[in-house]
Image (cartoon, rainbow, N blue to C red):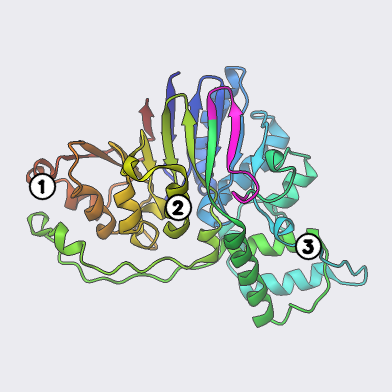
Amino acid sequence: MNINIKIFPALNGDCLLIKAGETNILIDGGYVNTYKEYLKPALIELSSEGVNLSLVVVSHIDADHISGILKFIEENEQQNIIPIQNIWHNSFRHLCQNEQIDSNFDEKQVFGDIKKELFPDLERCVSAKQGSSLATLLLKYNYPWNRQFEGNAVSLDTIRNVPIQKDINIILLSPNNEKLGNLSNYWRKELYKNGYLEVPHSIEFWDDAFEYLLAQEKQELRYVEQNISHKNDIDFHRLKEYPYIPDISPTNGSSISFILQIGDRKLLLLADSHSDLIVKELKKIFQPEEFPVFFDLIKLSHHGSFSNNSPELLNMIDSDKIIISTNGKIFNHPDMETLAWIITKKNGIKRRLYFNYHHQVCHNLSDNEIKEKYNYEVVLLTKGETIEILL
């Protein structure tokens, strides 16, 4: 079975479309412009072939992953772009099933206050009509939602192995119930800080507020002094001495990440997940003698952030096709420490590092002498192109 993977330019976000036979899986949607300029034309082309989207995975609630999906669902209802068989998306209703409803509660007024206080730049970052979250749209338009999980949260504690179609299977690696619980706790702390925790509310109202707040969560920037201004000065072994500090973002930790098995091939798709859980789950799936496990493609977690790609994880996995999806802005991803742990591994594989944007890290790695020494290749596309990989 031929496999076609498209990695669309999504600024600092993610948007992947995987086609295997009649199966089509969309993972995240980047920003609104990602959808308009790249994803929508690709979906129209797919639809012209008479096929559906077998699965849409919204890995987690973050503007750089969810905004394009919001716009897609909004327009899909109006324009019938392509049928969707199933959507995976964890919303507030999946974390808090027993919330009270007070008919006297003025949700519109309080939600307006929350938007003003917590995320004044909402309209710049979120694409759907004002007052609509992805959860609202999925309910309104009656989309099949978390179908394999009987409408409950996508969690590996519920189902680990999920058949998609014949010879195509997903092995969940993240999230588990603990990571989802951390997300719920984070949300409640934010409400408490802003004086809203004790207010009775409806599920529908908090679906919106929950999604908008989490889409605005900010990660702390890592400032690490690295003297890499000249290509030949890169010391990968020194970079590997930098301490690993794990990501503790509850939003990233809730990422839906998995192994996609297609026949005898397997793709490792890590969204923005936490390394600790991925390591734990990989050890359950594979025997010690199987490490490092070879994957036909790896999409690094959180755009190559070192906080999401621990040395332990990177020593457990390998591939000759490594995807780094980011334009390098906002959080300065990818981190050179992550790439140092990948590049210096010695097992005879010539690795291809795929970047969907040009930035300083790409140029630092493009020196022919360094590439020959460490047996890797940098794949750079011209501005605005889509990475397309055939397996």
- Residue kind at label 2, given as amino acid type: Ile
Tell me the quadrant of the picture where the C terminus can be found: top left
Mark 2–mark 1 Cα distance, whole angstroms, equals 30 Å
Give the secondary structure at mark 1: helix
Please name the residue shown 42% across and 33% down the image.
266
Task: Name the N-terminal-most of marks 2 and 1.
Answer: 2
Q: Which residue is mark 1?
A: 370
Q: Nearer the viewer, mark 3 or mark 2?
A: 2
Residue 339 is situated, as x and y percent measured from the top left of the image, at 25, 53
Task: Name the N-terminal-most of marks 3 and 2.
Answer: 3
Q: Which residue is mark 3?
A: 205
Crowding near the residue tagged with mark 2, few <14, some 14–19, many ≥20 C-alpha atoms within 10 Å: many
Mark 3–mark 1 Cα distance, whole angstroms, equals 54 Å
Q: Nearer the viewer, mark 2 or mark 1?
A: 2
Assess whether residue 166 is covered by the magenta stretch. yes
In the image, the segment drawn in magenta is 155-168
Assess whether residue 227 is covered by the magenta stretch. no
Tell me the quadrant of the picture where the N terminus can be found: top left
- Residue kind at label 3, given as amino acid type: Phe
Nearer to me, 116 or 70: 70
Circles 2 and 1: CB atoms closer than 8 Å:
no
Q: Which residue is mark 2?
A: 278
Crowding near the residue tagged with mark 3, few <14, some 14–19, many ≥20 C-alpha atoms within 10 Å: some
Task: Name the N-terminal-most of marks 3 and 1.
Answer: 3
Nearer to me, 124 or 387: 387
User: From this viewpoint, is residue 280 visible?
Assistant: yes
